[in-house]
Image: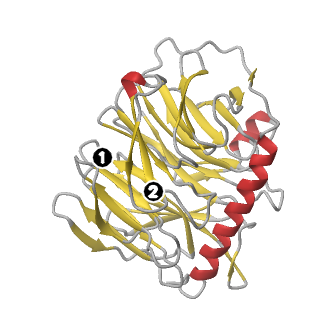
Amino acid sequence: MKCNALQSNFILTKVILEMRKNFIYFGMIAMISASLTGCSDEPNDKNPIPDLPTTSNGAYILNQGNYGSKIEGSLNFINYSVSKISRDLFRTYNKRSLGDTPQCGIAYGSKLYLGVYGSNTIEIIDKVTYKSLLQISLSDKVGQSPRSMVAKDGKVYVSMYNGYVCSLDTLTQTIDKTVKVGPNPEIIAIYDDKIFVPNSDGMNHPNYGKTASIIPLATFGTEGTSETFEVPLNPKQFLTNGSSLFILALGNYVDIPNALYKVDSDYKCKFIANATKAAIKDNFIYIIDAPWGGEVAYSRYDINSEELTNLDIKNIDAPSGLGVDPITGNIFISSYPLDNGDISYSLPGYVCEYDSNGVYKNKYDSGVGDTCIFFDLE
């Protein structure tokens, strides 16, 4: 793997930049008040709850940009029908910037919902025209710094890095409820009609968090109805296939390793494999393990047989994002590029596509900081 000798500096640099970036943003967003700015007269959907998807049309690539280098975020789309990528769609069709450091997105119904962490906004976009229908500016009252999104029953739930999870009603296009959780919540998942929230406490280095919050959907927003349980150090992401629940935790980057765990019915966590990124489809979890100072390893975990199979992934320099298409099963891995042998955080990256067995299919030139991958399902 090309990322062998570079991996230690890559991860260390990323952690330092992330902490520095977050401190800057929290100072900025403390001055922002809540407001809603309409961008279109298009009426709301009469039925905001989409049917279960059976078709996948393509993959969205959300690029963070680089705040320190004043490179704005952007949105790309890989169209399966022509095997080509369209870049910088938001600026092209809206003639303005998407904002600083977009970090999460979801396609739900006829719209895209994008969380722009640095600019502290949520953009609601028409999937067909890429026109912004609404930009929601966030305040401490509803939560700030959107980090991840999930959707169910006409609601988009958003984890906010300042310690909240909010509910966005897709019919009224407003944030209607907010729940206080632990410090610096990361990537959430819905399992058993509950939202599972990893409270990373990622701004509290080296004393990272060890708790997760559980929010029942039926009582979302009702005080006193959520609970917490203990998880491995520095929890980053919950994953589920609907029948099982898993958690990815990053440890302390020194003597407590990053790993993937299965969460049992008593909320006990059982070690599966070392991992820094993971994505799930049906009964398989696709894993990237990029530890400090070691080689990058790729594998696939069979949930039923509990077997871990190595994948011979090629053509990736420094993995930045991972997604698995829920319909096709194809794997998408984004990468930072190399510049004279060093990892670059200010040059455009790329995305490689593989089949479910890790066989290389295609490569797409992407944008700067292409860390978030999600899919156009219908």
Where is residue 255 shown, x and y percent of the image?
A: 47, 79
Residue 231, quarter of the rendered image? bottom left
- The answer to whether 26 is drawn above or below residue 131 in the figure is below
Q: Which residue is mark 2?
A: 210
Please name the amino acid that badge 2 sits on: Lys
Looking at the image, residue 343 sits to the left or right of residue 187; the answer is right
Q: Secondary structure at mark 1?
A: loop
> Between 199 and 246, which is closer to the camera in this rendering?
199
Q: Residue at x 62, y 58 (%)?
A: 370
Looking at the image, residue 134 sits to the left or right of residue 78; the answer is right
Q: Residue at x 67, y 61 (%)?
A: 18
Where is residue 214 shown, x and y percent of the image?
A: 39, 39
Q: Which residue is mark 1?
A: 241
Please name the amino acid that badge 1 sits on: Asn
Select label 1 or label 2 by which is in front. Answer: 2
Whether residue 65 can be seen here? no
Q: Residue at x 74, y 58 (%)?
A: 21
Q: Secondary structure at mark 2?
A: loop
**Could you classify mark 1 by the number of other residues whose Cα lies within 10 Å: few (under 14), some (14-19), or many (20 or more)?**
some
